[in-house]
Structures are given as C-alpha cells and as structure tokens.
Amino acid sequence: MSTAVDDLGAQLIAAESAHVAHNYHPLPIVAARAEGVWVTDVEGKRYLDLLSAYSALNFGHGHPAILAAAREQLDRLTLTSRAFHNDKLGPFATALAQLCGKDLVLPMNTGAEAVETGIKVARAWGYRSKGIAPDAATIIVANGNFHGRTTTIVGFSDDPVAHDDFGPYAPGFVHVPYGDADAIAAAIDENTAAVLIEPIQGEAGVVIPPEGFLRRVRDICTENDVLFIADEIQSGLGRVGETFACDREGVLPDVYLLGKALGGGILPLSAVVADEDVLGVIRPGEHGSTFGGNPLASAVGLRVVEMLASGEFQTRAKALGEHLAQALQGLVGHGVTAVRVAGLWAGVDIDPAVGSGREIAEKLLARGVLVKDTHGQTIRIAPPLTIRATEIDWAIEQLRHALS
C-alpha cells in the first residue's frame, strides 16, 4: 500500500491485528460502507458481495424496508428483557410460527444459541415426554457438521480446527455419515431423543444430501418417536429457492433452528420453532437470554418474516440459482473440479493445480468480488437474494479470470 488512502487501510488492519484476538483470518479488505449487493472499502473501492455474511445478509446491505422497521423501533423501545412483556414479541412470534407451520417460538440471539437451545429442548423432551432414563439421552449428528463454536457444539464436530484442544467434551452425541439415512436408522436406540442435521451442510462446502434423504429421516424419526431437528440457520429463509431447505423435499421437521438472515443484516436474532408438545416442555426459569426476544430484534424479525411471506425472495433465489448453476457448470474442467448449487448457494471446488480456495478468494478480492474459502479447496458463493443476473455474470467472469 503506497498512497495515503492505502495507508489508512493498512493502519486499520494493523490496529485490529494488534488488539483483536486472532480467531479469524479475514481477507485484507476494510469495509466502510455498503448498499444492496455492493461493499465499499475505506479506499473507495467497490466489491460485489458474494458471501452475504454467511447468509445473514439474504436481503442485502441496508434493505430499505428492514432499516425502516429498525429506525422506527429505535425511537420507541429497544430492550426490556423477558422480565416484562413488549408489544413486538407477540406479533413477531405469531408471524414466524405461521411461516414455519408451528405453534411456538423461543427467541434467542445467535445461531449457536439456537442450537444449544435445541439440544436442551430435545433432552428435556426425551426425559419428560418420551421417558428416557435420567442423563441417558443421546442425539444423532452427522459427520462434517457445523452447528457453531460453543464448547458443547465443538465437542461433536469432526473438524480438528473447531474441535481440538477445547475438551473435555459433553457426552451424548452419536455420529453418522452425512446423507446416510440407513446409518441414522441403525444408530437409534431407546435413548435417542433427536436427530440434529443441516438439510444442506454449509461450512462443509454446500454439501447437498442425496435426493430423498430428508424424507427418509422424517419417516425414521416418526417411526421411532425421535425428534427431527433441522438446523436451517444458513440454509433457511429463502437462500435455496424455498423458504426452508427442508421444503425442497416437502419435509416438515419437528424443530427448526433459525438465525442469521432472521436479523435482516441489522442485528443478531435466532429462534427455535416447534409445536407445543415439544417446546412446551421448557418451564419458566429453565432457559433464557437477556436480549432474546427484545423489541428491536422482534421488530426487525417481523419485517423479515413479512417479506418472506410474499414468496418474492424465494422465487428470485430459485430462478437466479439456475442461472448461477449454469454459469458455474461451464467452469468445471477449467480450474474447477466440481460445483454444488442449491438456489443462490454454491460450493465450488478449486483444482489444486490452479491454487487453493484462499488463493482464489484473494485473486477475486483483487478483481472486486468477495467470497470466502472453506476446507482448503472450496469457495462458497452466497450473494444477497437481491442480486441481478448481470451481476452474477460479471462475478463469474472475474472467477474465470482468477482461475486462469
């Protein structure tokens, strides 16, 4: 970096590196402003955002309708805690429950909190409704999973980076291969309370299970009196061309875990959504959060649900996802070894001969496109659902140049 403006970016990165714990390895861009699908850095350069904060920005940066809901609520009431009622939580919970086809909503803040809450609910349901012996409940999880980074969750991760050196780990989790319904059936016993899976594995590289897998999981869980918990934190809320990834197979899980896009790109908001016979097992005082269900988050979440209820964003994601898939398929054999696409969500495996996922992400950064690598050779593409076909075409052209 040579100019004064360049020096500003370098100085900000240096300050962050000096005083922020190094739990991330970010690309060398310092974002200062954003609108829609475009991010502007401190040096005035614009970038097309193909990451969307891991699907937290499904509606783009600063969507006017979401900003309006937040601004209106900021002038009224932001936080009460659940010690009192507020006038936004009820309407938000009603709308979200209807969107999910369920009875009850338990609001939290982050995706990992939603997963932790789902685990607690499943265990309580197992003891109080199914009759599992005390402290014996187990939950079946999939290899390659990513559900967050709290100590309980990393204990059942098989990613060494997430898992190693953070034990001892909580017991009660049984691993099976992802996408193998027969393995799930074989793993179930009298102590199984739930099956916890991502309908599409995001962090693993947008791994899509075989056709019919989710329907088989639903049937297996029903036959064995086991809860089917779908972690739709990244895959849900329009990303895959349906409201939820489970909708791709017409499946209704017992429990939805939601987050990221639920906060509209404005603030953290997550939720566990299920029927009364499941969420009703939690009693007052057994679970909570100071900020969970706060009026500001509820106002934003209500606006997000209202926007999804129209179906507009799901339709856009499906149509533009087909456009994206066709464009990416043309790169296979030209620096790309495989692509996996579900709506506006893609995993692109980079040929090691042309570089690592990180190296391609850095080349794209230089060409004005933001993506992020995962698991060495894969880059993930997840633009805001407001992106245009011409912007997708431009981004793929930049990827073509980066690969060559």
Image (cartoon, rainbow, N blue to C red):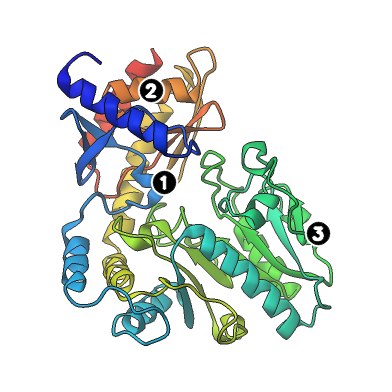
Q: Nearer the viewer, mark 3 or mark 2?
A: 2
- Amino acid carrying mark 3 in the image: Ala
**Separation of marks 3 and 1 at Cα, in angstroms:** 31 Å
Q: Which image quarter is the C terminus in? A: top left
Question: Could you tell whether 33 is left or right of 359 in the image?
Answer: left
Q: Earlier in the sequence, mark 3 or mark 1?
A: 1
Q: Residue at x 59, y 51 (%)?
A: 211
**402 vs 395: above or below:** above
Q: Residue at x 67, y 47 (%)?
A: 157
Q: Quick one: SS at disc 2?
A: helix
Q: Quick one: SS at disc 1?
A: helix
Q: Mark 2 — residue?
A: 362
Image location of residue 224, percent across then percent down: 76, 73
Question: Could you tell whether 180 is left or right of 104 in the image?
Answer: right
Quarter of the rendering containing residue 30: top left
- Amino acid carrying mark 1 in the image: Tyr
Q: Mark 1 — residue?
A: 54
**393 vs 336: above or below:** below
Q: Residue 19 has which mark?
A: none
Determine if residue 187 is in view. Answer: yes
Q: Residues within 10 Å of mark 2 (few under 14, many from 20)?
A: many
**Separation of marks 3 and 2 at Cα, in angstroms:** 42 Å
- Tell me if label 2 and label 1 are in contact, CB under 8 Å: no
